[in-house]
Amino acid sequence: MSLKLSSDARTDTGRQRLREPRAAEQFLPLLSVGLQHEYGASALAGLSLTPSQATRELCRQHGLLLRSDAGGLTLIGAASALPQLWQAQRDEACDYLLSWRLDSSEPLFALASADDVPRHLLLPLAPRSALDSDCEAWCQSLGRRELLRFAARQCRWKYLLLGDWASLAASGDIADLALSLSPALNTAATPLQFQRDAEQEALPDGRLAWVYRSPEPLPLAEHSSRRVALSDAGSTPARVLMGALPHGAPRSLQREARAGGSQWVTEIFLIR
């Protein structure tokens, strides 16, 4: 295979151009967005941010680069292109907005997230308006970092006790069994007491379970310092029977019909 040089490269002028080093173009981060989920980092696995057609076209016109992953995104541009970017907004009499659609290939994101978490991201290119700022001030305002926080789903935790749990209690009475959730660290709150249903619940396979429910919705979390304990409240002092019960998890979510309505619950089975 032979390599042919252009006619220009065969001239003295061409050889001189080849020898001259080009000035390095300076690229700057114009905007970066970090992602954080209250449930934990695993909820962000498989999350992607897809730019809208208008955002892709804007980047193409002005030579901007988009880099994104599950941890966030970064918009990059050449320093030499910023004055033209400022002028283009003034010519069009509007500040540019960027938008992305949030998609996830993993079901955990939807399960672990509150129902009202944003599914679209809309941000101005710069915090300052190009219409009200001179070029230097507008360019200096670029490079900010935003943090998008996703709230975790909150639902009632439902523990179902299967088997002869009453025999563990001092009196052999199921009423002596108590479930409680320890308070968060560095708080003076008292443990949260779960409430037992008056009647046992019949499962589809015919088994009966005693049901304990959290009195209020609790957030789902990948890791937590709080502990759920099963105690024998009939003994003095109360004796802890199990001190680290599993927490509610996204994959055990169920839609439960109750009291004329329906609600999300996460079911935890304790079998003895």
Image (tube, grey):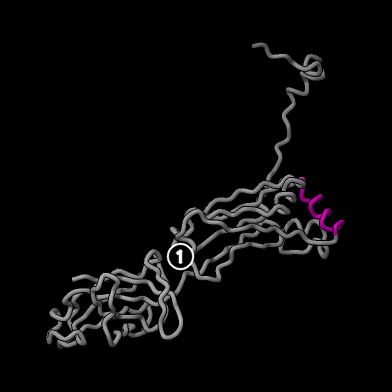
Out of 1 and 200, give the one closest to the viewer. Answer: 200
Give the residue drawn at x 35%, y 79%.
Answer: 183
220 magenta-colored: no
Q: Magenta span: helix, strand or loop, mainly?
A: helix
From the image, which quarter does the N terminus lie in? top right
The image shows residue 113, relative to residue 125, as above or below, that is below
Whether residue 244 is visible here, answered yes or no, is: no
> Label 1 amino acid?
Leu
Give the tally of numbered discs.
1
Where is residue 24 drawn, in percent x and y?
70, 37
Residue 90 magenta: yes
- Residue 51 percent location from the top left of the image: 65, 53
x and y, in percent, of residue 103 in the image: 56, 56
Pointer 1 residue: 111
The percent position of residue 57, horizontal first and vertical second, equals 74, 49
Q: Quadrant of residue 125?
A: bottom right
Depth order, front residue of 155/259: 259
**10 Å neighbourhood of mark 1: few (<14), some, or many (≥20)?**
some
Farthest residue, direction right: 91
> Horizontal placement of 230 versus 117: left or right?
left
Q: Residue at x 65, y 51 (%)?
A: 75
Residue range in magenta is 81-92
